[in-house]
Amino acid sequence: MKFYKELSKVYDIVFPKDETTLKFLCKALNHNSKVLDLACGTGTYSVALAQKGHRVDGIDLDEEMIALANGKGGLFANFKVGDMTRFHEVFDSEKYDMVYCIGNSIVHLKNKGKIENFIADIYKNLNEEGTLIIQIVNYDRIINQNIKSLPTIDRHEKGVKFIRNYNYKEHEEKVEFQTELIIHNDNKEEKLTNSVDLIALRKNELEEMLKNAGFKTVKVYGGFSEEPFSEDSFALVVKGAKG
């Protein structure tokens, strides 16, 4: 699809590496850990973790994203094109010290049952002291406050703007995510639009899924700065400890 092909070209401009996010991920790791990045995009955090000495596998459905990830190098980063729900087949049933799925990716799955089964599958592929980290948009805020959009990402100096709108479909328990990517290049403006339905996964539901999978400790935050979660939080970060 042209939208995702063009998005991949400016992905690192729209979503640059955030040091707070990287610090949060690193806190869950010991020296030379084995890590899995689900829906890794262009591999920003995979490469950063690999540069710190960890062994990282990254998987994403988008070939352009994976090509960019491979181009970043990284001695211990291994990227593959594939369905993240079948990671254990792609990476030959590896066991991981940490698995993370961030960037609102897990809600792209077909339904809540698929998400719950996916989390249970991740649990089985973690080492005994392993950790799972999931980050999504705070759908409690979207639904309860009738939020129609997220703040526009405007990288004016790079000529890129990313507009994000929401339409909650109550009867389906889904949110229609409508995006517009605007790119200015050589005095030309190109607008690309896309729409995808996302599972409107609430905080209590995601928390319960991790507990049902067997995680002994489940912590919830309103962001990667580890601030307390509230209905007003823009993000939901959940961290499950197996051991």
Image (cartoon, rainbow, N blue to C red):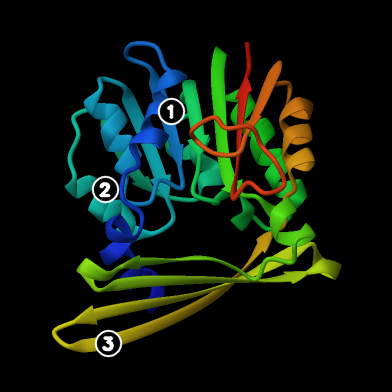
Residue 182 at x, y = what percent?
35, 79
Give the residue pinned by disc 1. Answer: 25
Q: Secondary structure at mark 1?
A: helix
- Residue at the bottom extreme? 188
Under mark 1, the amino acid is: Leu
Residue 189 badge: 3
Residue 56 at x, y = what percent?
34, 29
The residue located at (72%, 57%) in the rendering is 200
Quarter residue 157 falls in: bottom left
Rendered view: 212 above or below 172: above
The residue located at (54%, 39%) in the rendering is 223
Quarter residue 23 falls in: top left
Q: Secondary structure at mark 2?
A: helix
Give the residue pinned by disc 2. Answer: 69
The residue located at (67%, 49%) in the rendering is 232
Question: In the figure, is residue 142 to the left or right of 133?
Answer: right
- Residue at the right extreme? 171
Q: Secondary structure at mark 3?
A: strand
Q: Earlier in the sequence, mark 1 or mark 2?
A: 1
Q: CA distance from mark 1 to mark 3?
A: 37 Å
